[in-house]
Image (spheres, rainbow, N blue to C red):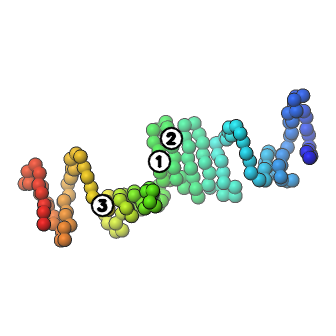
Amino acid sequence: QLKVLGDTTMADPAGAVYITGSVGIGNLTPTEALNVSGSISASGDIYAGEYIYHSGDEDTHLLFQNNLVNLVAGGKSAIKLETSTGKIRINNTNEDLDLEVMGDNGEVILMTDASGNSIGIGQGAAPVTGSTAALTVSGSISASGDITLAGGNLNFLIGEQYTLNNLSSLGHGFNIST
């Protein structure tokens, strides 16, 4: 059953309909040009202007602009892809939002701590609470190239802590064993 209220004109003999006002599908009091109560299925493309909003939550949306997509939840930009700058940004609104990358076993394998400006790598990879280290690694480190220390000390914790203040006296390489 089709019930039409308002002005309706047939656009062509094939059956297209032009309606001025609002249309409701499963909704007797539409507030937008088209209100659908229920699921929508499309076998073709769906086009959106600039925003797709979560109903009743105006600060959660997808933003589309030329060569830009931004996922925003609670007013905070979680992921922003902007091809004109060649960047994918996580936490684009500079909030205290941490990033976790999960392994297939459910363990955190990479974590960033936004408030501490630090990164943790490895199983249970949370950066050390209260540490000033920018990088915390849980597990072994392997490098196929040089590891460079630009200023500061090289500290080893092997049962007790050893600090090497001047590595230049060690020459080209060194070994530490207990």
Instruction: Please tell me whether mark 3 sits on a helix, a strand or a loop.
Output: loop
Is 140 situated above or below 21?
A: below
Q: Residue furthest top?
A: 13
Give the residue at mark 2: 82
| Crowding near the residue tagged with mark 2, few <14, some 14–19, many ≥20 C-alpha atoms within 10 Å | some
Q: CA distance from mark 1 to mark 2?
A: 8 Å
Quadrant of residue 50 in the image?
Answer: top right
Query: Quarter holding the C terminus?
Result: bottom left
Seen at 48% across and 53% down, the residue is 91
Element marked by disc 2: strand
**Please, what is the three-letter code of the amino acid marked with disc 2?**
Glu
Q: Residue at x 19, y 71 (%)?
A: 159
Q: Mark 2 and mark 1 in contact (Cβ < 8 Å)?
A: yes
User: Within 10 Å of the Cα at label 1, are there few (<14), some (14-19), or many (20+) other Cα atoms?
Assistant: some
Of labels 1 and 2, earlier in sequence is 2
Location of mark 3 (residue): 139
Amino acid of disc 1: Arg
Query: Is 140 left, or right, of 48 in this rendering?
Result: left
Q: CA distance from mark 1 to mark 3?
A: 28 Å
Q: Position of residue 95 (x, y in %)?
A: 48, 58
Q: Amino acid at mark 3?
A: Gly
User: Which residue corresponds to mark 1?
Assistant: 89
